[in-house]
Image (tube, grey):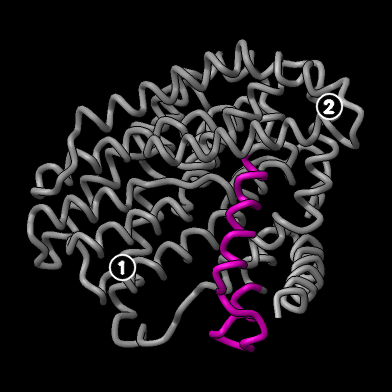
Amino acid sequence: MLVFQLAIILLASKVAGDVSVRLGQPSVLGKLLIGIVLGPSVLGLVHDTEILEELSQIGVILLMFIAGLETDIDEFKRTGKASSLVGIGGIIVPLLVGYGSGIMLNLSSIESWFLGLLLSATSVSISVQALKEMNRLKSRAGATILGAAVIDDVVVIIALAFLMSMAGGDVHLGTVILKKVIFFAGAFLTGWKIVPWLLKRFAPLRVTEAIISAALIICFMYAYLAEYAGVAAIIGAYIAGVAISVTSYKHEVFEKVETISYSIFVPVFFTSIGVSAQFSGIAENIGLIVSLSIVAILTKLAGASLGAKVSGFGWRSSLGIGAAMVSRGEVALILSAIGLERNLLSQDLFAVIVVVVLITTIVTPPMMKWLFTEQGQVKSNA
């Protein structure tokens, strides 16, 4: 029953998050691990249902929306070069090493490039929470990570379209690029002109929380249109948050949306990642899982860190930025599903990739905690 599962998730995630913080780690690590314990792999108290997946999707969308609300636009502009170098570096190294790994696994050339592309993906939703807990989200490093994530998502999706066209699919590269150009142009124009106007029109309405409703409408529409254009929904939600962050309603929206999000949706998102983990039949592929996990972690860490170093960060901050880009999250899972559907991944390799993605997600928060110098005491928002 859904209400029982929600009660279990909220109770367990809060307790696990608190224990994680007491042990000196970000609370998100505890939530990820408790999801595995609650899920079918261990206790079987919570199951990966369609409704839970939808609630989880709302959670990650709201998490990135909040990140957008907290973004310092001036800092974001100043980190444009650094974000570009981190994003591109974090793509090139995993792509090339992933291709080489595919060749060593006797995959075809096109399958090997797809494996490299999978390893190039990044999802910073987990990193955003770790940054918040370390009070680093508004820092130069935080702005660089968020900007690099946008660049990474766009480049990887365009590269995927190119690969699909090479593989003989019905994907037209020009159409894919055009849809993304139209989305970003429309998103920025709408954020500049329409979003402030819409909030002002909602403000005088004689209904409860009109401004918050308007903000959520904007967030969800941006997320939907981003996904329709082939960009991750979380990128659309982030841009919506940035658009609202420059209005006079920023603080009101932030405070109330954060309360809504961290009360239910964000804990469900973090915990559901662990719940969805499947460990059956992985024993025979344990060597491959370990090898690909090491490749996935080190290549993203090396590529993104090098980009950060070239752009002027110190080595420790550069490694911290690289660590924040390690998590592949839902972006890689979506790409994996596409690869399975297009016969670019075998069923066995798909199962391996799912576990590798989970591993990269779990190791990201403690790596960030270790590499970043904390500013203030770590706190748990969830």
Q: Which residue is mark 2?
A: 251
**Res 106 seen here:** yes
Which portion, as a residue range, is magenta?
35-64
Q: Which of the 4 quarters of the picture holds residue 217? A: top right
Q: Could you say which is closer to the camera, residue 255 or residue 364?
A: 255
User: What secondary structure prevails in the magenta region?
Assistant: helix
Residue at the location (34% across, 73% down)?
Answer: 351
Residue 110 lies, with reference to residue 314, above or below; the image says below
The image position of residue 285, as x and y in percent, is: 29, 81
Inspect the image, locate mark 2, and give the three-letter code of the amino acid beneath it: His
Q: CA distance from mark 2 to mark 1?
A: 46 Å
Q: Quadrant of the N terminus?
A: bottom right
Q: Residue at x 63, y 15 (%)?
A: 194
Residue 233 located left or right of residue 114: right
* Crowd around label 2: few <14 · some 14–19 · many ≥20 (10 Å): some
**The residue under label 1 is which amino acid type?**
Ser
| In-image side of 118 versus 78 (left or right) | left
Q: Secondary structure at mark 1?
A: helix
**Is residue 222 found left or right of 299 in the rendered image?**
right
Figure check: 211 above or below 365: above
User: What number is the disc on residue 291?
Assistant: 1
10 Å crowding of disc 1: few (<14), some (14-19), many (20+): few
Viewer-side label of 2, 1 = 2
Q: Earlier in the sequence, mark 2 or mark 1?
A: 2
Q: Which of the 4 image quarters holds residue 152?
A: top left
Q: Are marks 2 and 1 in contact (CB under 8 Å)?
A: no
Residue at x 13% of width, y 64% of height: 104
Q: Does the magenta segment cover residue 30?
A: no
Q: Is residue 211 above or below residue 267?
A: above
